[in-house]
């Protein structure tokens, strides 16, 4: 088929009132440069639903066309077949009382079918044309049960020695809470009983993670996220899948759609999937209204299994067709260049399996909670994670803006559907499987909770998830030691452990020391040596968080916000409340997901892009 024939065929499909010979030639040139299908390019560039184009093709070729095909097909055979869904172009089924083949051919294949129809009348009886997205979603619908089962059981098959589904029995949860209670009791004893061993253990729990943060701050120049100036051109970029889990967030859909449209990435190479819970009817309607044709689609997750975010994205993962995949939350506003930079880093460093972007709080100036959130994130994502990555230590990932090689993610079992901080768990599993994780220089803006109720609910879930992660990976210490090695084993307990244990002991220790100090001052005795040493111990615990927060805020040109770190004792007391509530939840509802209510960003919205008809069709490709 020569270029002239292809242009003529494209004009026939699209319609000559839309598509002139010059435009058709431009579409074909762009398709060749991007290695994309011309009909897909047409859909993305013109904003025409691809199903409209395929329906026109079926009419042109006098073939049958269908959209609702799931009821006419049978399920695939086995869980491994689920990962083939994005590549399937034909599927057998029954339609109109006949055995047929549902086909979603590419542009060139359609041209060949047209030539064959003149000599093979049987093709008209055998073929039913469907749009590629309808074939993909139809296969997902008919395999819904298998996808759901795979979503919460897939990890057990891939990694049987580290998942919350099997490794969180009631006895284990009770034992962990008992250990936590013993550590808290120790915090109440230390100020009175000058027992050397207790004091050493207490000091290690409180001061060791702080000491590492101080070291990371002192060596801040070396602890920076990786970056690159060598960016892939449009022609060399891979297909990138974006998963956006949504539940009861109809009000957030316009903002996240605008953020996705703002990406500096060829739309033909984007596979943006809104993953919506089936009971969120208002959100489903909002996504249907807001999606752009050609590169955005929606996957509806049925009820079943734990009602968690990782279960939802696990359900969608086999349907993703990209080489790489990233997860964004509803309120996220990633840097427009983030996908291109991540793809470029993956291409330059084949050993990297996961890249974590830096999360930045955009509503930092709202109140005390948001300022503390901003300082905490600045230190964690801008300093601590890059330091851990440089040392090749386990990284407790953030819950969003994690970029993966899709092949790696599938191979290691993806997310733990039963862990309510699936990000931290996945970071530890990547380390156990000797996968490289790096922090890279790209921002994603988020909004922090502005009310205490929402903040406590979110922190309670985080604390419960970190407890789950400690139990799941730490309950078999010998196996963990063998898979991580001594240094990484210690890092796991220092950093994931400190998220729970340091916070747990701070609350009662702080309140007791404060009460003793007030009593000593009130009785005019003055602070005793023991009280003074206890205050020093508290100060050493705060010092790491203060140093990391100060350096992190300075990197973001937010040094004026640093005085808020004086409020660390209050912030840690609130975190202690979350630990207390999380311990209760761990016993009686370990897999409950307390959803965070998201709010719309105050940052200026991306400008609305003009339609191609208004602005003219820009089909140039960066080569």
Image (tube, rainbow, N blue to C red):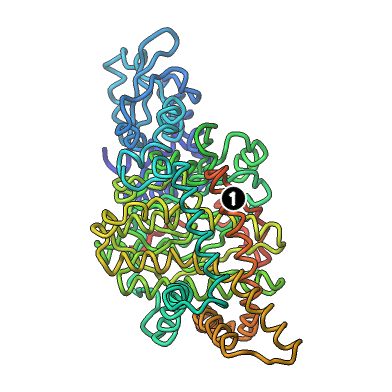
Quarter assignment of residue 318:
top left
Which quadrant of the rendered structure holds the C terminus? bottom left
Residue at figure coordinates x 47%, y 46% from the top left: 310
**Rendered location of residue 349, percent (x, y):** 26, 66
Residue at figure coordinates x 35%, y 73% from the top left: 228
Q: How many marks?
A: 1
Q: Please indicate, yes or no, whether residue 596 appears anywhere in the rendered image.
A: yes
Residue at figure coordinates x 34%, y 40% from the top left: 156
Which sits in the foreground, 191 or 429?
191
Does residue 342 appear to the left or right of 243 in the view shown? left
In the rendered image of this protein, does residue 496 appear above or below residue 563? above
**Rendered location of residue 283, percent (x, y):** 64, 42
Which sits in the foreground, 404 or 213?
213
Quarter assignment of residue 474:
bottom left
Quarter assignment of residue 610:
bottom right
**Rendered location of residue 204, percent (x, y):** 43, 75
Q: Circle 1 sits in a helix, a strand or a loop, which is it?
A: helix
Which sits in the foreground, 336 or 478?
478
**Mark 1 surroundings: few (<14), some (14-19) or many (≥20) residues within 10 A:** some
Which quadrant of the rendered structure holds the N terminus? top left
Does residue 346 appear to the left or right of 520 in the view shown? left
Q: Residue furthest top?
A: 97
Q: Please indicate, yes or no, whether residue 610 appears anywhere in the rendered image.
A: no
Does residue 620 appear to the left or right of 453 in the view shown? left
Does residue 283 appear to the left or right of 189 in the view shown? right
Which residue is tagged 1?
584
In the rendered image of this protein, does residue 206 appear above or below residue 55? below
In the rendered image of this protein, does residue 575 appear above or below residue 4? below
**Rendered location of residue 75, percent (x, y):** 38, 23
């Amino acid at each position: 088929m020569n270029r002239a024939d292809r242009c003529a065929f494209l004009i026939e499909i699209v319609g000559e009132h839309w598509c002139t010979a010059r435009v058709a030639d431009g579409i074909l040139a762009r398709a060749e440069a991007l290695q994309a299908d011309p009909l897909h390019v047409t859909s993305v560039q013109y904003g025409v639903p691809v199903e409209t184009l395929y329906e026109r093709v079926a009419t042109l070729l006098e073939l049958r066309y269908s959209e609702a095909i799931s009821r006419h097909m049978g399920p695939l055979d086995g869980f491994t077949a689920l990962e083939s869904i994005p590549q399937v172009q034909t599927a057998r089924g029954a339609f109109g009382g006949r055995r047929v083949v549902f086909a979603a051919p590419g542009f060139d294949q359609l041209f060949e079918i047209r030539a064959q129809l003149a000599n093979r009348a049987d093709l008209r009886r055998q073929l039913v044309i469907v749009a590629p997205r309808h074939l993909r979603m139809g296969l997902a619908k008919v395999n819904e049960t298998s996808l759901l089962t795979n979503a919460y059981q897939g990890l057990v098959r891939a990694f049987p020695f580290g998942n919350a589904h099997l490794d969180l029995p009631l006895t284990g949860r009770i034992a962990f809470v008992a250990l936590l209670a013993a550590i808290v009791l120790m915090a109440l004893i230390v100020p009175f009983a000058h027992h050397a061993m207790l004091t050493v253990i207490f000091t290690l729990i409180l001061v060791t993670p702080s000491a590492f943060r101080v070291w990371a701050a002192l060596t801040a120049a070396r602890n920076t996220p990786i970056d690159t100036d060598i960016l892939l051109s449009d022609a060399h970029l891979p297909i990138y899948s974006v998963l956006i889990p949504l539940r009861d967030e109809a009000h957030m859909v316009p903002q996240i759609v605008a953020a996705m449209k703002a990406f500096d990435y060829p739309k033909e190479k984007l596979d943006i999937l809104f993953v919506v819970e089936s009971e969120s009817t208002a959100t489903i309607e909002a996504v249907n209204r807001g999606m752009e044709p050609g590169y955005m689609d929606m996957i509806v997750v049925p009820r079943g299994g734990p009602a968690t975010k990782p279960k939802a994205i696990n359900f969608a993962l086999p349907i993703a067709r990209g080489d790489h995949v990233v997860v964004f939350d509803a309120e996220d506003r990633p840097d427009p260049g983030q996908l291109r930079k991540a793809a470029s880093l993956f291409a330059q460093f084949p050993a990297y399996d996961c890249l974590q972007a830096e999360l930045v709080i955009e509503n930092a100036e709202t109140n005390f909670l948001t300022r503390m959130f901003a300082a905490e994130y600045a230190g964690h994502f801008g300093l601590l994670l890059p330091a851990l990555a440089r040392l090749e230590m386990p990284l407790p990932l953030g819950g969003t803006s994690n970029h993966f090689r899709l092949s790696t993610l599938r191979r290691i079992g993806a997310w733990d559907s039963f862990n309510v901080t699936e990000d931290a768990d996945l970071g530890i599993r990547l380390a156990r499987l000797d996968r490289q994780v790096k922090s890279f220089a790209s921002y994603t803006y988020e909004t922090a909770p502005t009310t205490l109720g929402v903040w406590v609910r979110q922190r309670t879930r985080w604390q419960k998830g970190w407890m789950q992660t400690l139990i799941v990976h730490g309950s078999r210490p010998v196996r963990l030691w063998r898979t991580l090695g001594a240094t990484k084993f210690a890092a796991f307990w220092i950093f994931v452990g400190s998220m729970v244990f340091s916070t747990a002991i701070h609350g009662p220790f702080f309140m007791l020391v404060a009460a003793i100090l007030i009593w000593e001052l009130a009785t005019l005795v003055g602070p005793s040596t023991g009280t003074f040493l206890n205050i020093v111990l508290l100060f050493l615990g705060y010092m790491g968080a203060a140093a990391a927060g100060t350096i992190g805020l300075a990197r973001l040109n937010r040094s004026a916000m640093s005085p808020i770190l004086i409020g660390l004792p209050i912030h840690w007391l609130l975190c202690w409340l979350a630990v207390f509530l999380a311990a209760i939840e761990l016993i009686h509802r370990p897999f409950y997901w307390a959803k965070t209510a998201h709010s719309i960003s105050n940052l200026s919205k991306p400008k609305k892009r003009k339609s191609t008809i208004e602005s003219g069709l820009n089909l140039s490709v960066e080569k």
